[in-house]
Image: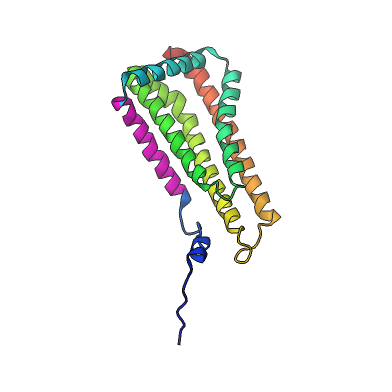
Amino acid sequence: MLKSSTITGKKFFVSFSLKKIDLFKILFLLFTFSFLFGTILIFVNHTETLNQLNFLMQKFLKNRVEQSIFITFFSSFFSSTISIIVLFFLGFFPLGQPVGFFMPIFHGLGLGLSTAYLYSFRGLKGIIFSILIIAPSEIIHTLILILAAKFSIKFSNNNFKNLFPEKFKQRNKEVVKLYVKRFSYLICLELIAALTDSITTFLFARFLK
């Protein structure tokens, strides 16, 4: 006769696993919803906030048009890599998972606000600017960011489970090595995103003044 086993709250919580959850799809949906929410905010926000956003965007567009291709490359790589490095270090903290989920949301919200501003206040030029200059590099960066968040959350979850050595083994060097290798690849891909950004800006920004 089979014995019924009871699972305590602690064991149930610790036994939680991300293996059966498609984190990439969840993070992509979080990014998509936050992007849409950011675009909606442009049309419902008050005048003072829109004026502040207009000032920031005008400065951003001016810098994009005037700076050299090398400055664009380095500034783009630096700004996009910061979030990847933050996610990398968050993975080593057992409770870093919530921030990992937040990063795609934050990025989607900012991107939604920026593109909606361009659509609303720059008209046809704003649409062309978004398609030719922002979209190519942002597609690459967003995919990298979601992958980085996925790896960070899973590694953080693994570290959380390692707080209970009676149930789970301590992480070994191979797991850490694989984690570092994955993020090294992602940073290399960020070079491609930055290169794409600098090339599209160099080719098209001058015509969108």
Residue appearing at x 58%, y 15% in the figure: 68
The reply, left or right, for residue 209 in relation to residue 152 is left
Which SS does the magenta portion mostly show?
helix
Q: Position of residue 197 (x, y in %)?
A: 52, 26
Query: In the picture shown, does residue 159 fall above or below 5?
Result: above
* Render colour scheme: rainbow
Q: Position of residue 25 (x, y in %)?
A: 43, 48
Outermost residue on the bottom side: it is 1
Q: Position of residue 20 (x, y in %)?
A: 47, 59
Residue appearing at x 70%, y 54% in the figure: 173
Outermost residue on the right side: it is 173
Query: In the picture shown, does residue 104 fall above or below 95?
Result: above
Outermost residue on the left side: it is 44
Q: Does the magenta run of residues contain 38?
A: yes
Image quarter (top left, top right, bottom left or bottom right) of the N terminus:
bottom left
Which residue is more in the foreground, 62 or 41? 41
Residue appearing at x 60%, y 42% in the figure: 88
Which residue is more in the foreground, 20 or 96? 96
Q: Does the magenta run of residues contain 11?
A: no
Q: Which residues are magenta?
A: 24-44
Residue appearing at x 38%, y 21% in the figure: 128
Image quarter (top left, top right, bottom left or bottom right) of the C terminus:
top left
